[in-house]
Image (cartoon, rainbow, N blue to C red):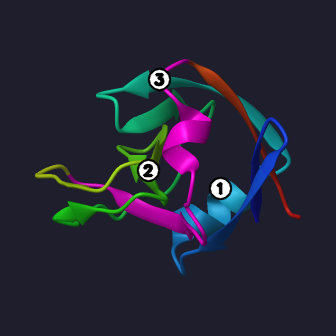
């Protein structure tokens, strides 16, 4: 799967989860994502996805997760967390992700590549 922000493209390695398969079935998809806590972009999806949440302990820059059953989250900083998420996938090369996503709302395009 691929994620595009402006002219920059990022390859996403999907996890072997029901949530990842359900998200992949929604592609192609364009989402307006808001910033939260200066470490993530998020959006509430129009549909619920299967969830199998666990506490990852450490979130890594490039993690693509599901919070609850409808909130898609892309993390652009690494940090520790007590919250539970369902793994969707990981951006293979998150270099420059923080600069690209910035602190403003952004438009993200997801495609099958």
Mark pair 1, 2: CA separation: 10 Å
Quarter in which the C terminus is drawn: bottom right
Label 3 to label 2: alpha-carbon separation: 20 Å
Q: Nearer the viewer, residue 53 or 5?
A: 5
Q: Which residue occupies 53% across, 68% down?
A: 90
Q: Secondary structure at mark 1?
A: helix
Which secondary structure, mark 2? strand
Q: Residue at x 85, y 41 (%)?
A: 7
- Specify the segment rendered in magenta: 84-104
Image location of residue 26, percent across then percent down = 76, 50
Q: Say whether marks 1 and 2 touch (CB < 8 Å).
A: yes
- The residue at the far left in this view is 82
- Name the residue beneath numbered marker 3: 103
Residue 36 placement, left or right of 24: left
| Residue depicted at x 54% and y 81% | 16
**Percent from the top left, x then y, of residue 101?**
57, 35
Seen in the image, is 3 located left or right of residue 103? right
Residue behind mark 2: 66
Question: Secondary structure under badge 3?
Answer: loop
Q: Residues within 10 Å of mark 1 (few under 14, many from 20)?
A: many
* Disc ID at residue 23: 1
Is residue 88 inside the magenta stretch?
yes
**Which residue does the image show at 52% across and 30% down from the upper left?**
102
Q: Few, some or many C-alpha atoms within 10 Å of disc 3 (few <14, some 14-19, many ≥20)?
A: some
Image quadrant of residue 112? bottom right
Label 3 vs label 2, nearer the camera: 3
Q: Is residue 20 magenta?
A: no
């Amino acid at each position: 799967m691929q994620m595009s922000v402006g002219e920059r493209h990022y390859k996403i390695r999907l996890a072997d989860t029901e949530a990842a398969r359900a998200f992949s079935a929604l592609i192609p998809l364009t989402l307006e994502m808001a910033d939260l806590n200066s470490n993530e972009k998020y959006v509430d999806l129009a549909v619920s996805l299967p969830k199998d949440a666990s506490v990852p302990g450490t979130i890594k820059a490039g993690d693509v997760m599901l919070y609850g059953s409808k909130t898609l989250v892309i993390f652009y900083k690494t940090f520790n967390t007590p919250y539970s998420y369902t793994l969707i996938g990981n951006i293979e090369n998150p270099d420059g992700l923080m600069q690209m996503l910035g602190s403003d709302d952004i438009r993200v395009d997801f495609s099958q590549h």
